[in-house]
Image (tube, rainbow, N blue to C red):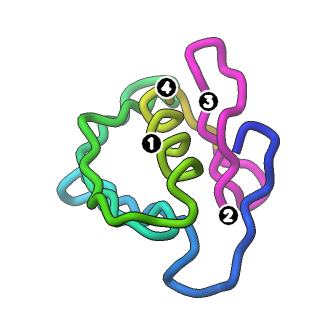
Amino acid sequence: MLGVPVQTSNSLQDAHLIFSASDKTVTGSGSCNRISGPYEMGKKHSLKFGNLAATRMTCQNQAFENKLLETLQRVEFYQVSTGELWLKDSKKRILLKLR
């Protein structure tokens, strides 16, 4: 995220997002708390997240989760490249690379 790799354990505790095309919602985890909310996709690879909700358990990684939620609100575009989903800001700078 923003040039900082996220450690993965290949478990459900890893930070992840799951997009549901049928109801245009995203769910997932910031590694401790659950995340959910709406998203909209538009023309020319535009992507905007609506108000994202998160559970608020006290976590060791709270600063990371807060930064993740803040970063998701800045997303305006996406690109799929080499098996990754790149989430980009309004100037099309990469904010997140998701695998």
Residue at horizontal 64 percent and vertical 12 percent from the top? 91
Spatial CA span between label 4 and label 3:
8 Å
Which mark lies nearer to you, 1 or 4?
Answer: 1
Magenta range is 80-99
Q: Which residue position holds label 2?
A: 99
Which mark lies nearer to you, 2 or 1?
Answer: 1
Q: Which residue position holds label 1?
A: 69
| Disc 3 residue crowd, few under 14, some 14–19, many 20+, Cα 10 Å | many
Q: Which residue position holds label 4?
A: 74
**Secondary structure type for disc 2:** loop
Identified by mark 1, the residue type is: Leu
Nearest the camera: 72 or 67? Answer: 67
Identified by mark 2, the residue type is: Arg
Instruction: Report x, y in % for residue 97.
Output: 70, 49
Q: Tell me which corner region of the image, top left, top right, bottom left or bottom right, holds residue 8.
A: bottom right
Spatial CA span between label 2 and label 1:
18 Å
